[in-house]
Image (spheres, rainbow, N blue to C red):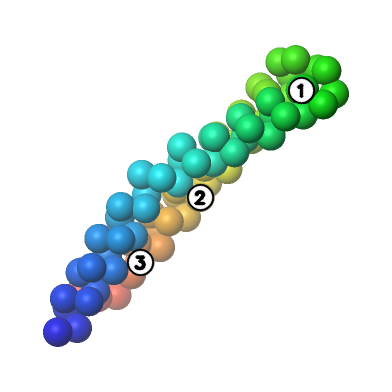
Amino acid sequence: MRSHKTGWRRLAELSSLGLILPSSIIVGLFFGYWLDKLLGTHPWMLLIFTIFGIISGLSSLLRAVKKINSSSDKEE
């Protein structure tokens, strides 16, 4: 029974990987667009915060992959 629960948990962890990068980019786009409208600096804040979103998303994605790999190594 325990292997069944870990299988569902692993499936949930793997399915969340597809949302990490796009959600970080969208948050960066939103804040950049909002700051551009607020400060009148079109398109600089949008570009800067999009780059921050990409970097943040990639680092989160790498951390999540390392965590999943280490947990699968411990199970085996």
Foreground residue among 10 and 76: 10
Q: Earlier in the sequence, mark 1 or mark 3?
A: 1
The quadrant holding residue 35 is top right
The residue at the point 81 percent across, 17 percent down is: 41
Find disc 2 in the rendering and name its residue: 60
The residue at the point 50 percent across, 50 percent down is: 60
The quadrant holding residue 40 is top right
Asked if residue 38 is positioned above or below residue 73 in the image, the reply reads above
| Screen quadrant of the C terminus | bottom left
Pointer 1: residues within 10 angstroms few (<14), some, or many (20+)?
A: some
The residue at the point 61 percent across, 30 percent down is: 29
Find disc 3 in the rendering and name its residue: 70
Asked if residue 33 is positioned above or below residue 61 in the image, the reply reads above
Asked if residue 57 is positioned above or below residue 30 in the image, the reply reads below
Q: Earlier in the sequence, mark 2 or mark 1?
A: 1
- How many marks can you see? 3
What amino acid type should be assigned to the residue bearing mark 1? Answer: Asp
Find disc 1 in the rendering and name its residue: 36
Task: Tell me if label 1 and label 3 are in contact, CB under 8 Å.
Answer: no
Left or right, 22 with respect to 5, comes to right
Q: Is residue 73 visible?
A: no
Q: Nearer the viewer, mark 2 or mark 1?
A: 1
Foreground residue among 10 and 40: 40
Q: Earlier in the sequence, mark 3 or mark 2?
A: 2
